[in-house]
């Protein structure tokens, strides 16, 4: 039986579906990206430092988008981006672009300001980035993407930037890969910051406990000295009790202020205000901010208490018209800084040297002088009593010099 060749139908070959092939390639690439991201997450779990985390994230991101250059930065407390790592540029880039702020023209500065990714397909043709393009010209960077690393609240913690040697517009897959890297980095950087803060808080707590124990010993020694001196001499028991309770009250005011404001130090103005709160309407306090360590704060509180007690009994605060001015300043001579404090009584009765210089005078001269390495002076003048304290500023403010 013969067949007409023209009537024979051969099995048709399946047509090549280019769309299906492209989808398969994209899916394969996505799976490879996820494998890279999974491997990255495992490595980050064992990273030794924050810099190691950021460098691994940067290199993984560059691999996923086939970038040839990269940098990574961390946000400092002052809001600046500080360079901590790179690849492809060379170590000199760490110094050349060590710090970047919001006003700079770089892609990372824009990403920091916007708290969102910045994409520049071609630095050389974008007029907004001509300055950074010129700075990066010798490195060959053309296309650029800067991706911020954010915490859960949307604050920028760090930044990584990748660069291509030609114009490049990242596609959706590449952008998703960069997002995944940034998300992983964010969680690890946030945990790193939290762990550092916890460690610093624990160290601070240990120091505070030592300081409280040290201060307690000092306070007990001061109380013992006050008790011994207050009960000596020709005073009656009531007079001795009044002196003792008054001096303890001065210490208590300072101790409470330390506890409320800072267990380590106090502003000088706060010490004065706490010690003179019952005479505040007739006292004027002036002087620059000076932070005084706890032990010196206690000494100054005793000093002001003695001056205020004497002014109330014998001086400017003993009548209806008198007043007190307390003023301090810092005098600079070359590299040295001197602290000068003056207690001046105005419109009170004439002052005169007492017949018996008691423990109050000892506090004002010997105790204060010993603690602050100086020689305070008592001025008994016709127009009112004056007390002058002239010491090195470092002796007043340096806690290491007052430790026992």
Image (cartoon, grey):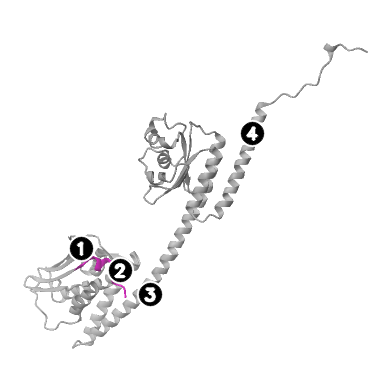
| Residue that protrudes farthest toward the left in the picture | 382
Instruction: Please state the extent of the stretch shown in magenta in the rendering.
Output: 391-404
Marks 3 and 4, how far apart in space? Answer: 69 Å
Circle 3/circle 1 CB separation < 8 Å: no
Q: Position of residue 387 (x, y in %)?
A: 15, 71
Residue 213 badge: 3
Circle 2/circle 1 CB separation < 8 Å: no
Q: Earlier in the sequence, mark 4 or mark 2?
A: 4
The local crowd at label 2, few if under 14, some if 14 to 19, many if 20 or more residues have their Cα within 10 Å, is some
Residue 153 lies left or right of residue 27; in this view the side is: left
Tell me the quadrant of the picture where the N terminus can be found.
top right
| Residue that protrudes farthest toward the right in the picture | 1
Q: Earlier in the sequence, mark 3 or mark 2?
A: 3
SS state under label 4 = helix
The relative height of residue 343 versus residue 245 in the rendered view (above or below) is above
Q: Position of residue 262 (x, y in %)?
A: 34, 65
The local crowd at label 3, few if under 14, some if 14 to 19, many if 20 or more residues have their Cα within 10 Å, is few
The local crowd at label 1, few if under 14, some if 14 to 19, many if 20 or more residues have their Cα within 10 Å, is few
SS state under label 3 = helix
Q: How many marks?
A: 4
Circle 1/circle 4 CB separation < 8 Å: no
The relative height of residue 306 versus residue 124 in the rendered view (above or below) is below
Residue 397 in magenta? yes
Label 2 belongs to which residue? 399
Q: Earlier in the sequence, mark 3 or mark 4?
A: 4
Q: Residue at x 10, y 79 (%)?
A: 353
Label 4 belongs to which residue? 25
Residue 182 visible (yes or no):
no
């Amino acid at each position: 039986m013969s067949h007409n060749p023209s009537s024979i139908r051969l099995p048709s070959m399946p047509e090549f579906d280019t769309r299906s092939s492209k989808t398969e390639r994209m899916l394969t690439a996505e799976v490879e990206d996820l494998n890279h991201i999974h491997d990255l997450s495992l490595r980050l779990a064992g990273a030794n430092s924050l810099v190691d985390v950021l460098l691994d994230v940067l290199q993984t991101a560059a691999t996923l988008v086939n970038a040839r250059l990269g940098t990574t930065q961390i946000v400092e407390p002052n809001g600046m981006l500080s360079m901590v790592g790179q690849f492809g540029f060379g170590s000199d880039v760490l110094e050349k672009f060590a710090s970047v702020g919001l006003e700079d023209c770089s892609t990372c500065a824009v990403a920091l300001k916007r708290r969102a990714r910045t994409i520049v397909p071609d630095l050389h043709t974008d007029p907004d980035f001509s300055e950074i393009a010129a700075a990066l010209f010798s490195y060959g960077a053309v296309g650029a993407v800067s991706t911020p690393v954010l915490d859960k609240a949307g604050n920028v913690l760090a930044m990584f930037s990748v660069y291509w040697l030609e114009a490049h517009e990242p596609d959706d897959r590449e952008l998703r890969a960069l997002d995944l890297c940034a998300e992983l980095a964010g969680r690890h950087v946030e945990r790193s910051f939290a762990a550092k803060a916890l460690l610093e808080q624990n160290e601070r707590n240990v120091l505070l406990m030592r300081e409280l124990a040290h201060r307690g010993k000092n306070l007990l020694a001061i109380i013992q000295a006050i008790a011994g001196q207050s009960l000596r001499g020709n005073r009656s028991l009531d007079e001795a009790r009044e002196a003792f309770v008054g001096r303890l009250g001065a210490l208590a005011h300072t101790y409470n202020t330390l506890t409320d404001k800072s267990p380590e130090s106090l502003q000088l103005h706060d010490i004065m205000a706490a010690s003179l709160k019952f005479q505040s309407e007739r006292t004027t306090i002036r002087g620059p901010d000076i932070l005084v360590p706890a032990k010196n704060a206690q000494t100054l509180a005793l000093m002001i208490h003695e001056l205020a007690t004497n002014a109330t009994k014998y001086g400017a605060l003993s009548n209806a018209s008198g007043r007190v001015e307390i003023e301090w300043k810092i005098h600079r001579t070359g590299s040295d800084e001197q602290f000068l404090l003056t207690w001046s009584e105005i419109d009170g009765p004439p002052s005169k040297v007492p017949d018996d210089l008691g423990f109050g005078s000892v506090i004002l001269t010997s105790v204060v002088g010993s603690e602050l390495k100086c020689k305070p002076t008592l001025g008994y003048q016709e127009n009112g009593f004056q007390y002058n304290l002239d010491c090195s500023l470092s002796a007043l403010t340096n806690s290491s010099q007052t430790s026992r």
